Image (cartoon, helix red, strand yellow):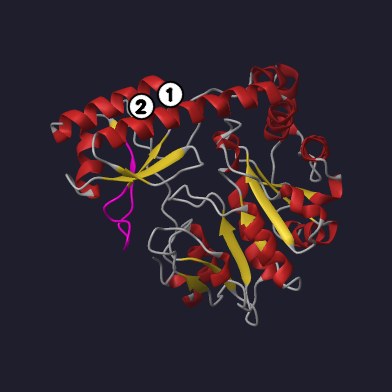
């Protein structure tokens, strides 16, 4: 770092995204991308005429995209805020709803960006341990004086919290915000979006990266009361009014409107996930119950770090976290069926099962 870096940020430990190596052709099962291409309607929307319009600024209100999202979820446009990936939406929420008097609260094993934002905004977080079985119990959060962040399904475990439990949490203290990060909700989990009709202290954050195959477009969105969305807009317009580019707005609108393709892709991933879980269990793996497009697995026959490195040498990327409690696990994205069959065969050979 340079001698000019401010002391307040010199101690930051930045988030480490999943690796994107280019040294060889890998089966990529490490960053929870979709194995399917974007909807054909997305490709159709990105025509030559629209590409020529890149000389113009994008619509800062993202009206066409906002309207499509609102229609899909049965909300008003005033209840929707698109972001440059769900990460930006979450970062806005950390800035808008946390301060020195009410910091963020989140699990000890969850999305790694939460602790980075807490330090970036100089907040004092409350870190709540998951239970021994890696489940999250809302009773552990009930009486916290904090803005609560729950990834549901959780990452990297893939496990879920029942929506009825989140309802209890919201009702227990209506004067604090609960942010539910639903980046992986479309693969069999239940969304909290219907609770928006009852609770003005709920913010739901979702993404286009996983279930709508637009990781490269960097699109996410927040859903909440008009007042919460107005709060987030204050942050957005104080930071980057043109946060979504023209082509991403078009791509997001087309993807959101293609419900048939969305259901086909998410259904296929759930089918492949079930096959993969069964296959790994037959090899002696412990696999946590997942409602996401990845699984979290371990085996007594091989340490997590060793398995990660051995698979990488053989052209398969998975994710390993050098962290307490989960060091023996690897997170495996659900890819195409043939990719998962290759993974299982390779693991079987490695373990000599």
262 in relation to 104, above or below: above
Please provide percent x and percent y for residue 183. Answer: 58, 45
Q: Secondary structure at mark 1?
A: loop
Q: Foreground: 129 or 76?
A: 129
What kind of secondary structure does the magenta stretch mostly adopt? Answer: loop
Q: Going 73% across and 60% down the picture, which residue do you hit?
A: 202
Tag 1 residue: 336
Tell whether 199 sits left or right of 114.
right
- Residue 338 appears in view: yes
Tag 2 residue: 340
**Mark 1 to mark 2 CA distance (whole Å):** 6 Å
Label 1 close to label 2 by CB (< 8 Å)? yes
Residue sitting at the far left: 352
163 part of magenta stretch: no
Assess disc 1: are there few (<14), some (14-19) or many (≥20) residues with their C-alpha within 10 Å of its C-alpha. Answer: some
Q: Quadrant of residue 245?
A: top right
Q: Secondary structure at mark 2?
A: helix
Residue sitting at the far bottom: 101
Q: Foreground: 27 or 337?
A: 337
Question: For the magenta stretch, what is the residue range?
Answer: 317-329
Q: Going 74% across and 59% down the picture, which residue do you hit?
A: 232
Assess disc 2: are there few (<14), some (14-19) or many (≥20) residues with their C-alpha within 10 Å of its C-alpha. Answer: many
Please provide percent x and percent y for residue 82. Answer: 72, 46
Please provide percent x and percent y for residue 239. Answer: 70, 58
Q: Going 53% across and 74% down the picture, which residue do you hit?
A: 125
322 part of magenta stretch: yes
Please provide percent x and percent y for residue 153. Answer: 54, 49
Q: Going 65% across and 82% down the picture, which residue do you hit?
A: 101
165 in relation to 317, above or below: below
Q: Foreground: 29 or 165?
A: 165
Q: Quadrant of the N terminus?
A: bottom left
């Amino acid at each position: 770092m340079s001698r000019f870096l401010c002391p307040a940020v010199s101690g930051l430990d930045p988030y480490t995204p999943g690796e994107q190596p280019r040294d060889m052709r890998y089966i990529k099962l490490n960053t929870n991308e979709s194995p399917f291409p974007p909807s054909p309607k997305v490709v159709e929307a990105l025509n030559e005429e629209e590409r020529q319009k890149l000389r113009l600024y994008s619509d800062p209100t993202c009206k066409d995209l906002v309207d499509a999202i609102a229609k899909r979820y049965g909300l008003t446009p005033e209840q929707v805020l698109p972001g440059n990936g769900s990460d930006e939406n979450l970062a806005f929420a950390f800035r808008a709803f946390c301060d020195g008097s009410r910091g963020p609260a989140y699990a000890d094993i969850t999305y790694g960006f939460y602790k980075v934002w807490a330090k970036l905004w100089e907040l004092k977080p409350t870190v709540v341990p998951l239970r021994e079985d890696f489940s999250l119990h809302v009773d552990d959060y009930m009486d916290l004086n904090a803005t609560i962040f729950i990834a549901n399904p959780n990452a990297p475990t893939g496990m879920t919290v029942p929506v009825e439990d989140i309802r209890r949490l919201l009702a227990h203290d209506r004067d604090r915000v609960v942010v539910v990060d639903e980046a992986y909700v479309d693969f069999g989990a239940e969304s909290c979006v219907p609770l928006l009709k009852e609770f003005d202290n709920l913010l739901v954050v979702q993404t286009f990266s996983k279930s709508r195959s637009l990781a490269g477009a960097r699109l996410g969105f927040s859903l909440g009361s008009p007042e919460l969305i107005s709060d987030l807009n204050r942050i957005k317009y104080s930071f980057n009014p043109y946060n979504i580019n023209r082509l991403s707005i078009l791509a997001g609108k087309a993807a959101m409107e293609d419900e048939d393709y969305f259901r086909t892709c998410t259904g296929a991933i759930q089918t492949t996930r079930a096959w993969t879980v069964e296959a790994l269990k037959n090899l002696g793996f412990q696999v946590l119950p997942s409602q996401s497009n990845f699984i979290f697995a371990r085996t007594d026959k091989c340490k997590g770090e060793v398995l990660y490195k051995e698979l990488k040498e053989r052209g398969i990327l998975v994710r390993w976290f050098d962290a307490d409690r989960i060091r023996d696990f690897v997170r495996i994205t659900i890819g195409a069926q043939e990719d998962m069959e290759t993974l299982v065969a390779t693991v079987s050979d490695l373990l000599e099962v």
